[in-house]
């Protein structure tokens, strides 16, 4: 099975995690993988990866002053895209095997 969306999907991953931005690419990659996340972001990033619907305004406000709006947006998007990638790639592999 050939994934017709692989090229564009991989380009989105590359740009979100490594493209230019207000936050460091290494930080965006860390939150995407939920590995080596700075302690002040850990609660927010863990919630995004495990139970995104539980993220509250207070969770965001706790770190907003330190990171600022633009960098925090990039961090949150990276975590969400990383969490989706963690689910998507094994699902595509399972479909390939079926």
Image (spheres, grey):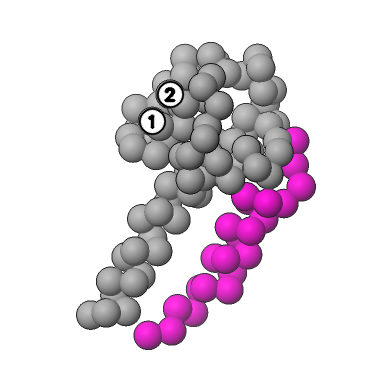
In which quarter of the view is residue 26 placed? top right
In which quarter of the view is residue 28 placed? top right
Residue 82, relative to residue 34: is it above or below?
A: below
- In the picture, the disc for residue 43 is 2
Residue 55, given in percent of the width and then of the height, sits at 40, 26
Residue shown at 52%/35% (left/top)?
A: 36
Residue shown at 76%/47% (left/top)?
A: 20
Residue 19, given in percent of the width and then of the height, sits at 72, 51
Closest to the observer: 42 or 84? 42
Q: Tell me the SS state at disc 1.
A: helix
Distance between mark 2 and mark 1 Cα atoms: 6 Å
Read off the magenta span. 1-22
The residue that disc 1 covers is 47
Residue shown at 53%/14% (left/top)?
A: 62
* Magenta stretch holds residue 3: yes
Disc 2 packing (10 Å; few <14; some 14–19; many ≥20) = some
Q: Quadrant of the C terminus?
A: bottom left
Closest to the observer: 48 or 31? 31
- In the picture, the disc for residue 68 is none
Does residue 52 appear to the left or right of 11 in the view shown?
Answer: left
2 and 1 marks in contact (CB < 8 Å): yes
Can residue 77 be seen in the rendering of this structure? no
Residue 11, given in percent of the width and then of the height, sits at 63, 65
């Amino acid at each position: 099975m050939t994934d017709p969306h692989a090229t564009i999907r991989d380009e989105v991953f590359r740009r979100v995690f490594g493209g230019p931005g207000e936050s460091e690419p290494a930080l965006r990659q860390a939150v995407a993988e939920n590995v080596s996340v700075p302690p002040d972001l850990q609660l927010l990033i863990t919630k995004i990866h495990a139970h995104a619907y539980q993220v509250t305004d207070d969770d965001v406000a706790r770190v907003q002053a330190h990171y600022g709006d633009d960098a925090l947006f990039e961090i949150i998007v990276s975590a969400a895209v990383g969490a989706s990638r963690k689910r998507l790639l094994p699902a595509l592999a399972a479909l390939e095997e079926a």
